[in-house]
Amino acid sequence: MRFLIRRLGFYLLAAWASLTLNFVLPRMMPGDPAAAMFARFRGQAQPEQIEAMRKAFGLSDAPLIQQYGTYVSHALRGDFGLSISSFPAPVIQVIGTSLQWTLLLGLVSTILGFVIGSLLGVFGAWRRGGLADSVLPPLLLFVGSFPYFWLASLALFFLGFRWKLFPLRHAYADNLMPSWSWDFIGSVGTHLVLPAGTILLVSIGGWMLGMRNTMISVLAEDYITMAEAKGLSQNRIMFAYAARNALLPNVTAVGMALGFVISGALVTETVFAYPGLGYQLLTAVRNLDYPLMQGIFLMITFAVLIANLIVDLLYVRLDPRVRG
Amino acid sequence: MAIDQYEELSHLFQNWRLGRRRLLQTAGALGLSASTAGAAFSRSAPAAAQASDKLLVTVSHQQQPSWIRNFNPLLDQDSSRWPTQAGIYEPMLIYNTATGETVPWLAESWEFSPDNAQITFTLREGVMWSDGQPFSSNDVKFTFDYMIAHEALAGTESVRGVLPLIASVEAPDAKTVVVTFSEVYTPGLYDVGEQMIVPEHLWKDVADPVTFANENPVGTGPFTEVGAFQPQYYEILKNPSYWQEGRPYVEGFRAPLYPNNDSANLALVSGEIDTASNFVPDIKNTYVAVDPEHFNYWFPSVGTTVHLYANTTRAPFDDPNVRKALSMAIDRPQIVKVAMYDYTTPSDGTGLSAAYDTWRSADAVAAGDWVTLDLEKANALLDAAGLVKNGDTRSLPDGTPMSYDINVVSGWSDWVSTCQIMAKNLGELGITAQVQTYDFSAFFEKLQKGDFDLSIWSGRGGPTPFGYYRSVMASATVTPIGEIAADNFHRYGNEEADALLDQFAATSDASEQTDLMNQLQMVFAENAPLIPLFPGPDWGEFNTMRFTDFPSEENPYALLAGYENPERLIQLVTIKPVSA
């Protein structure tokens, strides 16, 4: 219990620190959002419009400390103001259009990557020197070390554009309305194959290698020999004795990965025109859209904190030594 | 527009081993079978109620990370969804750059008072708002009073600049609008005439028009009905009771989300898009060659002219001969070929783009001979200005070697290579020039505050060259160094130009204006206030597989680019389905 309270206190402090950094950092960026908007037009807009935009965006000249007060109180109520790049939509609404797709893409690819990678690692280590162990790790690492951009573009070109096996863009077919129908779910599924598949392809090697390496050192432990001596079944030793203990580093890693899911897979979303938060964030940074940046950054930091908290709690469950 | 985004974002094609050109030619071999690759998938699922099953024009005119429902025509045109301005809403008149004509739209005619201080617009009969209410002069009066009251509304084009000069807008009867200027300013006709008009009966109750998203728009335009609207897709359908009998010919537009040039260009090549306004590299091979019968583009050089700004508050750039000498060293044909993919042509000595061909004076073009490459003459001019060359380097009279930065925005690769070519060209005169790239904000602040020696940037557009010449030569637009300037970044004022501009703004007589504009061009050609390089192209692609009668080089009845506001209205009511 004391452990949990200590952790909770730490997380509260971290949350406050990130809230504050989130306020300070964008304001240290040079430039002016109205001028950045103007840049986007590149000669198509008239200079007179800049001044009007500046007024519309309501860029405040109030003292920083006062702005900070307003910011914290608004942020606690979930109010991040109006987005500039998607003016005059509230930040919450802008994030709302992409959050679910980022979560879907991120969770599916991370969880599948973790599960498949870890299982491969377990089997690879169990049959050391076997086919899976000698072929898969180098192959997966080889694939994973390609520039992701190139791999994704290749998949898009051949699987999407040339052979038309999968759609070229978006999270579901344009003529469907979001609903719980099989049509819609099927459409979401097919649209997810390329983006999630390419992420899986490059990430699975890491999970496998991590699991395999800890697994090998665990297999050398005395309690494994002991379990074997007791005549336990191979499956029981592999999963309940070896894998459970070898899993801890990977659980930490998956916690971190899940936290970052919300920041979106920028390149994936760009290549497959997948309507996620990553691309939203890039546009926000480019347009100096402080309110939207603050909203997204805050969600990322909070997601990382929450994911870590969950990992901490899981550790209590998985590793009895922590409970003390 | 958006070359930079194309280059910077990803190099999607470039990274492929095949190389961009071969790749798309391969795509071309697939021909029509490649069309609607995305739709092929969606056909397997029945259409939901909300998406229209009519034949809609697929467009790519805006790039956003997701579509936000906003149809407020009084904000800048990038904040609202295409085609809110000039589509859902309409102006009183439209200046058609392609033909040089001013087209009556919601107004049937207009007339200047004898002293030119008043314009009387006569509105068209029988125009209805899409909710069935009649359109009247009160709506026009309301719109202008509203714009004046709310300074944060950007409005259409440069209307903001003219609003402070408006003394009153009156509606003596339902069909008449009288705009009175506090000082005579005849070019204001276009600024006032092209402003989108909103319905008073709905907008008078809007609490804050600046943050009003106007989700269910009511307009007079040819397309007023919003169909399906989702973050990745929306439809705008036609106004069933549009005032132009029988028009528009198409049922409406569909706008799938193409967040960047790469994804839009892929859809273009696959034949999915009917019309787009994106930069496409090497378009003849990458796009037209895929289906020469249907795929077409038109990149007229009617955009704003791109210039080399030389800061005239710093010696030796205060000397017109030095500016001319720099200009004579620049190899414009090479810039156009290498940096601009041959999509434009070199500027002449008037600085005017192809949009102003009707105004162009042959005498001024002849006088502006300093835009052709002539190193000998350039060297002679510099020698005469007391800038002596010792060996390979040229020095100022006090002995400091001439060495300058050319400022440019990092990532705007077409401009960066333009500057690199210029730096090399200036080197041949013995002037050391370094290309200095900055982030946009930093770059623009230096430009606005006059904190630069040499900098590249575009000029100003507008229906007549008046705005352009005013912004590069009028003393009234010169801002002190260190203060933010809206234009005239090079800080150049010319009294002769001031007088001509004043006379131009005071007359509504066409032949008198032509005469004054010829003289203004001459002043420009003689003084080289800044160094014009090339007019920016307008980007526009179209596909005649499903729709036809798009503006093109052969049929230039209006401009093609979807961002050309409000001119695109002419195109929107002219294009038709192929079968019709």
Image (tube, rainbow, N blue to C red):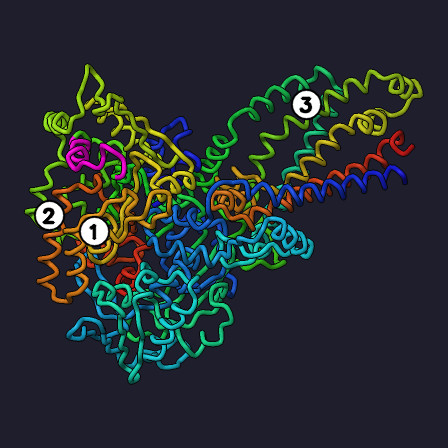
Near mark 3 (Cα within 10 A), the count class, few <14, some 14-19 or many ≥20, is: many
Q: Quadrant of the N terminus of chain A?
A: top right
Residue wearing tag 2: B522
To the question of a shared chain for discs 3 and 1, the answer is no
Query: Bounds of the magenta span?
Result: B313-328
Q: Is residue B37 magenta?
A: no
View extreme (bottom): residue:
B173
Q: Nearer the viewer, mark 3 or mark 1?
A: 1
Residue pointed to by mark 3 = A209
Tell me which amino acid carries mark 1.
Tyr
Secondary structure under the numbered disc 2 in the rendered image: helix
Quadrant location of the C terminus of chain A in the rendered image: top right
Q: Secondary structure at mark 3?
A: helix
Picture layout, residue B302 above or below residue B179: above
Residue B263: x, y in percent? 42, 43
Q: Gap in Å between the C-alphas at discs 3 and 1?
A: 67 Å
On the image, the x and y values in percent for residue A221 come to 85, 17
- Which chain's residue wears label 3? A
3 and 1 marks in contact (CB < 8 Å): no
Label 1: which secondary element: helix
Question: Which is more toward the observer, B72 or B189?
Answer: B189
Q: Residue at x 81, y 19 (%)?
A: A219
Horizontal side of A10 relative to B131 (left or right) equals right
For label 1, the residue is: B469
Q: Position of residue B545 (x, y in %)?
A: 30, 53
Q: Which of pointers 2 and 3 indicates the residue nearer the eye?
A: 2
Q: Is residue B327 magenta?
A: yes
Identify which amino acid the numbered label 3 is placed on. Leu
The subunit letter for the residue under badge 1 reads B
Q: Earlier in the sequence, mark 2 or mark 1?
A: 1
